[in-house]
């Protein structure tokens, strides 16, 4: 049992990921069904890490591919995986640890025997209770090994020590753990919590979500990335006059004129839906429309930086950080911020993003663009997406990955209109 059919990317070729032969890739989270059995307390589990390895992997939900995250200090004593089509109480794939005497590669069925409540602090002041999140973690044995492997308390205590040490501390100066595990509960006793507090994604919901995101992406392409007449450079004076006339008509109707203004309106209207879709539904297809694909990747990281507390100050032409107000919102609103930016300002903001990403290496969170997950420890999967990198502080050396260089194809062409020299002279 090591493969499943690639159906998730079958719906829309314009928003899918394919290998170099044009074949659709299977989505590790959406293409496999959970198939939970209430009678046997078992379900399908997709594998992330193998036991006795220091390599740690993560899942990029958008592409549905696994990628190498970091080299840990300690070897896991169990497999780590996640339940397909299932989110835990924090909105992340439901985490599972399980034991097996067999060499497993992709997924298997697991019988759940215990669970723990995992508390973790991702950012901020971890001495404040409200900065800690809590989720249920399942522990079990591969169904094929149930009769041969007896799960002892000592096994789980060893796993608990490894997990807490592996995740490291909350800062270089503070040795407090970033993850804490509660006492164990038998799964049968905690099953009600699992069934009522976990988010199960049914096929009907997934179909509607995917279709809604495709519609949003098509709207984004039409209104933001596709050139309208007012976005084009001109070579003749009568074309410039016609363009100015069109701009004046839009202004009179109080409609956005250029791409920055249209982006501001789009995010004001669809910002929350956009963030959800970007996380779960792949945007674009490098194989079928590479120009559009690279445009979306620049805009994707531009918006993501704002979601993480960065913003571009158009007056000072510099990226800065903001703070969260008492109402839980960032002090700098991206749609509002964009209203103060010209096309030239926006091009400057994009051009400075590589410098911002380089600066973020020393912060708790940064972004990498992963094309193929290559390297000695890589999965060799095609991802072509931005992934978040969390900094982990622990005692062993070389526990952090170096920032990956941006691909040469990832170039911003700019939104400033290129008029002919003759038109520029006349306009002056």
Image (spheres, rainbow, N blue to C red):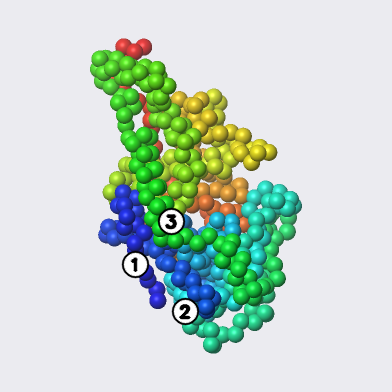
Q: Which residue is mark 1?
A: 5
**Residue 323 rendering spot, x and y as whole percentages:** 64, 38
Local crowd size for mark 3, using a 10 Å CA cut-off: few (<14), some (14–19), many (≥20): few
Foreground label between 3 and 2: 3
- What residue is drawn where x is 50% and y is 80%? 143
- What residue is drawn where x is 65% and y is 56%? 133
- What residue is drawn where x is 60% and y is 68%? 192
Front residue of 326/419: it is 326
Local crowd size for mark 1, using a 10 Å CA cut-off: few (<14), some (14–19), many (≥20): few
Q: Secondary structure at mark 1?
A: loop
- What residue is drawn where x is 47% and y is 65%? 84
Foreground label between 3 and 1: 3
Sequence order check, earlier mark of 1 and 2: 1
Q: Is residue 259 visible?
A: yes
Q: Is residue 76 visible?
A: no
Front residue of 98/349: it is 98
Q: Secondary structure at mark 2?
A: loop
Location of residue 397 by image quarter: bottom right
| Distance from the alpha carbon under mark 3 to that under mark 2 | 34 Å
Q: Look at the picture and state if 382 lies above or below 153.
A: above
Front residue of 17/76: it is 17
Q: Look at the picture and state if 377 lies above or below 363.
A: below
> Quick check: 396 left or right of 93?
right
Q: Which residue is mark 2?
A: 103
């Amino acid at each position: 049992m090591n493969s499943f059919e690639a159906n998730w990317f079958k719906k829309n070729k314009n928003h899918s990921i394919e290998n170099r032969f044009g074949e659709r890739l299977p989505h590790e989270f959406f293409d496999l069904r959970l198939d939970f059995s209430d009678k046997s307390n078992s379900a399908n589990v997709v594998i992330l890490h193998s036991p006795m390895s220091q390599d740690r992997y993560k899942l990029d939900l958008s592409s549905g591919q696994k990628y190498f995250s970091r080299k840990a200090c300690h070897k896991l004593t169990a497999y780590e995986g996640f339940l397909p089509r299932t989110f835990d109480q924090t909105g992340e794939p439901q985490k599972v640890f399980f034991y097996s005497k067999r060499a497993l590669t992709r997924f298997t069925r697991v019988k759940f025997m215990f669970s723990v409540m995992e508390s973790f602090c991702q950012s901020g002041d971890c001495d404040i209770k409200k900065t800690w999140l809590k989720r249920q973690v399942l522990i079990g044995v591969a169904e094929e090994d149930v009769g041969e492997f007896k799960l002892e308390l000592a096994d789980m205590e060893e796993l608990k020590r490894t997990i807490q040490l592996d995740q490291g501390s909350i800062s270089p100066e503070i040795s407090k753990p970033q993850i804490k595990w509660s006492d164990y509960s038998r799964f049968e006793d905690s099953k009600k919590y699992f069934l009522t507090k976990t988010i199960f994604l049914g096929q009907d919901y997934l179909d509607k979500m995917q279709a809604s995101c495709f519609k949003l992406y098509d709207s984004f392409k039409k209104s933001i990335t596709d050139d309208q007449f007012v976005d084009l450079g001109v070579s003749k004076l009568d074309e410039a006059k016609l363009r100015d006339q069109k701009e004046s008509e839009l202004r009179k109707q109080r409609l956005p004129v250029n791409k920055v203004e249209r982006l501001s309106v789009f995010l004001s209207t669809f910002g929350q839906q956009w963030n959800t879709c970007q996380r779960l539904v792949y945007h674009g297809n490098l194989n079928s429309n590479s120009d559009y694909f690279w445009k979306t990747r620049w805009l994707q990281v531009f918006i993501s930086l704002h979601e993480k507390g960065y913003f571009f100050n158009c007056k000072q032409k510099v990226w800065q950080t903001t703070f969260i107000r008492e109402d839980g919102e960032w002090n700098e609103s991206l749609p509002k911020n964009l209203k103060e930016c010209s096309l030239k300002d926006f091009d400057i903001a994009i051009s400075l993003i590589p410098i911002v990403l380089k600066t973020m290496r020393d912060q708790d969170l940064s972004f990498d663009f992963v094309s193929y997950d290559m390297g000695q420890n890589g999965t060799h999967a095609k991802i072509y997406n931005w992934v978040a990198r969390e900094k982990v502080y622990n005692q062993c050396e070389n526990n952090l990955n170096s920032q990956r260089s941006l691909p040469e194809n990832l170039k911003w062409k700019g939104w400033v209109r290129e008029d002919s020299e003759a038109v520029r002279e006349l306009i002056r």
